């Protein structure tokens, strides 16, 4: 399977999951930045990095951790989808 297509599919899965939780989502297509999905909820904003079958490396994790955000109501999350598992592993970073 094409890696780009798989990544896109996982991003849309993440968006569906978040939309079911009440968020409005947008996707940064072909993103080279930190965040793949931006989810806006009634009380917070969620910045999401989406991965398929692997967790981010130290450099990428550091870049996300140091990404400037307002002190409240913005969370940063990593969604890792592993093959043959129905739900993602979700990690929140500070």
Image: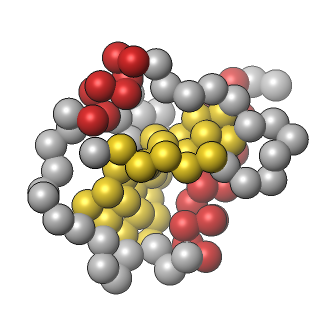
Position in image of residue 25 (x %, y %): 46, 64
Q: Taking 80 as reference, is 43 left or right? A: left
Residue pictured at 15% horizontal, 43% vertical: 68
Quadrant in which residue 7 is drawn: top right
- Choose between 14 and 4: the one closer to the eye: 14
Label total for image = 0
Q: Is residue 66 above or below residue 40?
A: above
- Choose between 75 and 8: the one closer to the eye: 75
Residue pictured at 12% horizontal, 58% vertical: 71
Q: Is residue 89 above or below residue 51?
A: below
Position in image of residue 18 (x %, y %): 55, 67
Residue pictured at 12% horizontal, 57% vertical: 70
Position in image of residue 73 (x %, y %): 23, 68
Q: Taking 31 as reference, is 63 left or right? A: left
Q: Taking 32 as reference, is 9 left or right? A: right
- Choose between 54 and 34: the one closer to the eye: 54
Q: Is residue 61 above or below residue 86?
A: above
Q: Taking 89 as reference, is 75 left or right? A: left
Q: Residue furthest right?
A: 84
Note whether residue 72 is visible.
yes
Note whether residue 11 is visible.
no
Residue pictured at 61% horizontal, 76% vertical: 20
| Coloring scheme used | secondary structure
Q: Quadrant of the N terminus?
A: top right
Q: Quadrant of the C terminus?
A: top left
């Amino acid at each position: 399977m094409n890696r780009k297509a798989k990544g896109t599919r996982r991003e849309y899965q993440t968006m569906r999951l978040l939309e079911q939780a009440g968020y409005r989502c947008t996707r940064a297509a072909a993103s080279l930045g930190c965040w793949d999905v931006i989810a806006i909820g009634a009380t917070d904003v969620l910045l999401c990095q989406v991965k398929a079958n692997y967790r981010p490396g130290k450099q990428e994790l550091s870049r996300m951790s140091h990404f400037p955000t307002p002190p409240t109501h913005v969370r940063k999350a990593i969604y890792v989808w592993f093959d043959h598992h129905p739900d993602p592993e979700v990690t929140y970073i500070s």
